[in-house]
Image (cartoon, rainbow, N blue to C red):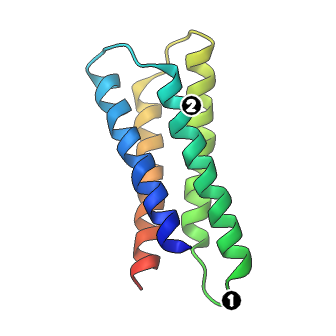
Amino acid sequence: MLTFIVIVYIIVAAIGLYMFAKLFSKTRRKLVIGIIHGSLGLFGLACLIFYISLSKGETPVESFLLLLLALFIGGGLLATNISGKKFPLWIAMIHIGVALTGIYFLISYWIR
């Protein structure tokens, strides 16, 4: 189960890298790509909740909390994008940093 969750988040990160490249090259991003990115991230969180609730002993709670925070920040970015407003790039950088830290904690838990 944990291997599946890590694979899901690697896919989410790959889609995020594509969106990052589009954002900083100032080209038009498709909204559907962002929705797929967020939906897969939310699916990964749901799987992580399921894993944490069924496992005994040490669990990747830090990873879950960081990925949940990244979800909230990303949701704000999506809402701003849907409303047609521009968001500051530093907010996107915070989203990226929090998500990468959460993925790092998840992978380091998975390796142990």
Q: For mark 1, what is the residue? A: 56
Q: Residue at x 41, y 50 (%)?
A: 11
16 over 44 or under it: above or below: above
Q: Which quadrant does the C terminus fall into?
A: bottom left
Residue at (52%, 24%) from the top-left corner?
32
Image side of residue 84 versus residue 111, left or right: right
Task: Give the amino acid at mark 2.
Answer: Ile
- Taking 49 as reference, is 41 left or right? left
Residue 97 visible in image:
no
Front in this rendered view, residue 83 or 2: 2
Across and down, in percent, residue 80 comes to: 59, 20
* Residue 21 seen in this snapshot: yes
User: Which residue appears farthest toward the left when viewing the image?
Assistant: 25
Regarding mark 2 in the picture, which secondary structure is present there?
A: helix
Tell me if mark 1 has few (under 14), some (14-19) or many (20+) residues whose alpha carbon lies within 10 angstroms of its own. few
Q: Which of pointers 2 and 1 lies earlier in the amino acid sequence?
A: 2
**Residue bearing mark 2:** 35
Tell me which corner region of the image, top left, top right, bottom left or bottom right, holds residue 57: bottom right
